[in-house]
C-alpha cells in the first residue's frame, strides 16, 4: 500500500479512503477472514458471523450507478445542489456517494462510474472539506 | 394473550407551534383521549410515550400536566415509528394481562430545530456524507421511474390526492387543495421532488387509551379491536438492495395479515407512511393493494381516493395532515379508530370495517428503514 498522502482540503471519510502518492484515491473496506463478508466503510467486527477478524481491503475504483438524484436542500455546510448516488462495486458492496463532474442529465441508471475526490462543502469554521466521490467513467488515459 | 381494543382517541391539529412546550402541545390530545374513553385517570395502569426528538422524560413532562403520575411511564424512541412502537408495547402489556387499561402518547415538536430537513444521526456514515431523507426517497423514486416508467406528473398526483383528503380534516396541517401543475412548479428539494412532494415539518400530538376486551365494554360502546400489532426492524445489508420495494414493509405486512387473519383484500381503509410521494406508491404494492409496478394505475383510477376501492390516507396523510415524527403513528391510529366508528363526516369511508396503519422510518445506512410498525383494527 502506498504511503497515505492527505489531499487538500482534508478528506472527511477517515479510514474509509486512502490517497496514494499519485493522488489517486482508493476506498477501503473490510473483509471477514472467516466468512468473507465484505463491508464498507471498514469495521472491526463481522456483522454476519460476529468474528473480530476483519482485514482491510482496497475496493475497486469503478462500479455501477444504482440510483442518483440532485439534492437542493441539505444541512448547513454542504455545497448545494449536489448529486447523491449509490454505487455498486464489483466486490458486492454498495457505497453512498456524491456524483461529480456531470450534470444529472448526463447520468443514467447502471452507468459505469469511477472513483475520484471532490470538495463537497465547508465546515463550521468556513474551511473547505472534501471526500471521495464518483464521476462518469472516462476512457483510459484521459485524466483531464 | 387477551383481546385488546382501543376505547379512546384524541389528537391536536398538526402545525407549527414554536411558542408551546412539548407538554403544552401534547396534553390536550391526552385529555381528549381519556375523556373519549370514559376511564378515570386512576384506571390507567401504565403509559407509553413515543417521541423521536422530544428529549428526556417526555412522557413524564406531558403527564405531569394532567396529573397522571406515579404509574409506570415508558418513553419510546423508534424514529418515525416511535408512537406506533409505543402502542405495540402497551398492547403487549394489556394483552398479556399485566394491565387492564393503558395509555399511548405520540408527540413531537420539530419547530425547535428550525426549518429544513429532519435532523438525522450524525454518527452515521452516510449522514456524515450528506445523506438526507429527501435524497434517500429521491433515489428510490428515480429508480422506480426508470424501472416502471412512472412519470413526475403521476408522482405529483399522490400529493394532489393527499391534499384533497386533508382539506376535509380539521386536524390537518395543510387544508388547501393543490393541482399537479402547482406540485410540479414548487421549489425543488431533491429531484424528482419539489416541496409539495415532501411532508411538512411541524408539531403535534395524538393519544389512545386501550383496554382488555374483558373491561372495554364497561367504558366504551364502540371499542375498536386490535387484530394485529406488528413491529419489525430493517435488515442490515452491506451490498445490493432493490430500492423499488420496501422489504421491511413487505415482511411486516405478511406478519400483520397473518396475525390479523385478514388479507389486503379485506382492508377497507389504510393510513400509510407517505413521507414523500413515492413512498405511498411503494406501500400500495408492499401492502398488497396492487401488484408490483401497478401503483400509479391504482392512484390514477381513483381506487385509493375517498370513494374508491381502498381509500389510503383519508386523513390527508403525512403530506397534508403533517408529520411531527413521533406523533405520526398514534395519529394514524386515531384516524382509523374514528373511521371504524363512523365519525369522519365528509371524509368517512362508508361501511369501513377493517383498517390498517403503517408507520416506518429511520435514516441510517445499510437499512431499508430502521423500523416499521403495522397495525390492523376492526370494529
Image (tube, helix red, strand yellow):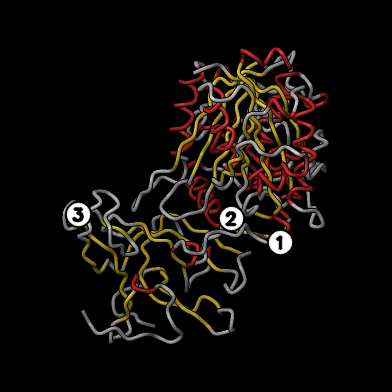
Tag shown at residue B40: none
Q: Marks 1 and 3: in contact by CB < 8 Å?
A: no
Q: Mark 2 falls on what kind of element? A: helix
Give the percent coordinates (x, y) of residue B22: 73, 50
**Chain to which the residue tagged by mark 3 belongs:** A
Give the percent coordinates (x, y) of residue B153: 65, 45
Classify 10 Å Cα crowding around label 2: few (below 14), some (14-19), many (20 and above): many
Give the percent coordinates (x, y) of residue A60: 27, 66
- Which residue is labeled 3 in the image? A36
Residue placed at 64% from the left, 32% from the top? B271
- The residue sitting at the front extreme is B70
Quick check: do tags 2 and 1 share a chain? Answer: yes
Classify 10 Å Cα crowding around label 3: few (below 14), some (14-19), many (20 and above): some
Q: Marks 3 and 2: in contact by CB < 8 Å?
A: no
Tag shown at residue B115: 1
**Chain to which the residue tagged by mark 1 belongs:** B
- Which residue is labeled 2 in the image? B134
Q: Mark 1 falls on what kind of element? A: loop
Classify 10 Å Cα crowding around label 1: few (below 14), some (14-19), many (20 and above): few
Image height check: is B3 above or below B140? above
Q: Pick the quarter of the image with the C terminus of chain B.
A: top right
Distance from disc 3 to disc 1, alpha carbons, whole Å, reads 44 Å
Q: Nearer the viewer, residue A110 or B253?
A: B253
Residue placed at 69% from the left, 25% from the top? B43
Distance from disc 2 to disc 1, alpha carbons, whole Å, reads 14 Å
Q: Nearer the viewer, residue B155 or B238?
A: B238
| Location of residue B70 by image quarter | top right
Q: Marks 1 and 2: in contact by CB < 8 Å?
A: no
Give the percent coordinates (x, y) of residue B95: 53, 22
Distance from disc 2 to disc 3, alpha carbons, whole Å, reads 34 Å
Q: Please report whichever mark, 2 or 1, sits nearer to the chain's N-terminal start.
A: 1
Q: Mark 3 falls on what kind of element? A: loop
Amino acid at each position: 500500500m502506498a504511503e497515505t498522502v492527505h489531499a487538500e482540503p482534508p478528506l472527511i471519510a477517515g479510514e474509509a479512503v486512502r490517497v496514494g502518492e499519485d493522488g489517486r484515491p482508493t476506498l477501503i473496506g473490510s473483509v471477514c477472514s472467516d466468512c468473507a463478508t465484505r463491508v464498507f466503510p471498514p469495521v472491526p467486527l463481522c456483522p454476519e458471523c460476529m468474528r473480530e477478524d476483519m482485514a482491510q481491503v482496497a475496493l475497486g475504483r469503478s462500479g455501477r450507478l444504482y440510483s442518483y438524484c440532485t439534492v437542493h436542500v441539505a444541512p448547513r455546510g454542504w455545497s448545494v445542489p449536489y448529486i447523491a448516488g449509490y454505487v455498486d462495486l464489483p466486490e458486492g458492496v454498495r457505497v453512498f456517494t456524491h456524483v461529480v463532474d456531470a450534470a444529472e442529465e448526463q447520468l443514467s441508471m447502471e452507468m459505469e462510474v469511477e472513483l475520484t475526490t471532490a470538495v463537497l462543502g465547508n465546515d463550521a469554521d468556513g474551511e473547505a472539506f472534501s471526500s471521495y466521490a464518483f464521476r462518469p467513467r472516462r476512457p483510459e488515459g484521459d485524466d483531464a | 394473550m387477551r383481546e385488546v381494543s382501543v376505547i379512546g382517541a384524541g389528537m391536536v391539529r398538526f402545525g407549527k407551534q414554536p411558542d408551546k412546550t412539548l407538554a403544552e402541545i401534547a396534553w390536550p390530545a391526552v385529555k381528549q383521549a381519556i375523556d373519549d374513553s370514559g376511564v378515570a385517570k386512576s384506571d390507567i395502569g401504565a403509559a407509553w410515550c413515543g417521541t423521536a426528538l422530544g428529549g428526556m422524560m417526555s412522557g413524564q413532562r406531558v403527564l405531569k400536566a394532567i396529573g397522571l403520575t406515579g404509574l409506570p411511564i415508558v418513553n419510546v424512541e423508534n424514529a418515525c415509528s416511535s408512537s406506533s412502537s409505543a402502542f405495540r408495547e402497551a398492547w403487549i402489556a394489556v394483552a398479556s394481562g399485566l394491565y387492564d387499561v393503558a395509555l399511548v402518547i405520540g408527540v413531537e415538536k420539530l419547530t425547535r430545530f428550525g426549518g429544513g430537513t429532519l435532523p438525522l444521526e450524525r454518527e452515521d456514515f452516510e449522514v456524515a456524507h450528506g445523506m438526507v431523507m429527501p435524497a434517500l426517497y429521491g433515489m428510490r423514486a428515480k429508480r422506480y421511474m426508470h424501472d416502471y416508467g412512472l412519470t413526475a406528473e403521476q408522482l405529483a398526483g399522490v400529493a394532489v390526492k393527499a391534499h384533497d383528503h386533508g382539506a376535509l380534516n380539521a386536524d390537518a396541517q395543510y387544508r388547501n387543495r393543490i393541482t399537479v401543475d402547482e406540485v410540479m412548479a414548487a421549489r425543488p428539494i431533491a429531484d424528482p421532488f419539489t416541496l409539495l412532494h415532501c411532508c411538512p415539518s411541524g408539531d403535534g400530538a395524538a393519544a389512545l387509551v386501550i383496554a382488555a376486551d374483558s373491561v372495554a365494554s364497561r367504558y366504551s360502546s364502540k371499542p375498536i379491536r386490535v387484530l394485529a400489532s406488528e413491529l419489525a426492524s430493517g435488515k442490515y445489508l452491506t451490498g445490493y438492495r432493490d430500492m423499488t420495494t420496501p422489504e421491511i414493509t413487505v415482511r411486516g405486512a405478511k406478519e400483520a395479515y397473518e396475525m390479523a387473519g385478514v388479507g389486503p383484500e379485506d382492508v377497507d381503509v389504510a393510513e400509510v407512511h407517505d413521507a414523500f410521494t413515492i413512498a405511498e406508491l411503494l406501500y400500495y404494492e408492499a401492502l398488497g393493494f396492487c401488484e408490483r409496478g401497478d401503483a400509479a394505475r391504482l392512484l390514477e383510477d381513483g381506487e385509493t381516493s375517498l370513494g374508491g376501492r381502498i381509500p389510503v390516507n383519508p386523513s390527508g396523510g403525512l403530506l397534508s395532515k403533517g408529520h411531527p415524527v413521533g406523533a405520526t403513528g398514534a395519529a394514524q391510529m386515531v384516524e382509523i379508530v374514528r373511521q371504524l366508528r363512523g365519525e369522519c363526516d365528509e371524509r368517512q369511508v362508508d361501511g369501513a370495517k377493517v383498517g390498517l396503519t403503517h408507520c416506518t422510518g429511520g435514516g441510517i445506512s445499510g437499512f431499508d428503514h430502521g423500523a416499521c410498525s403495522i397495525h390492523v383494527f376492526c370494529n
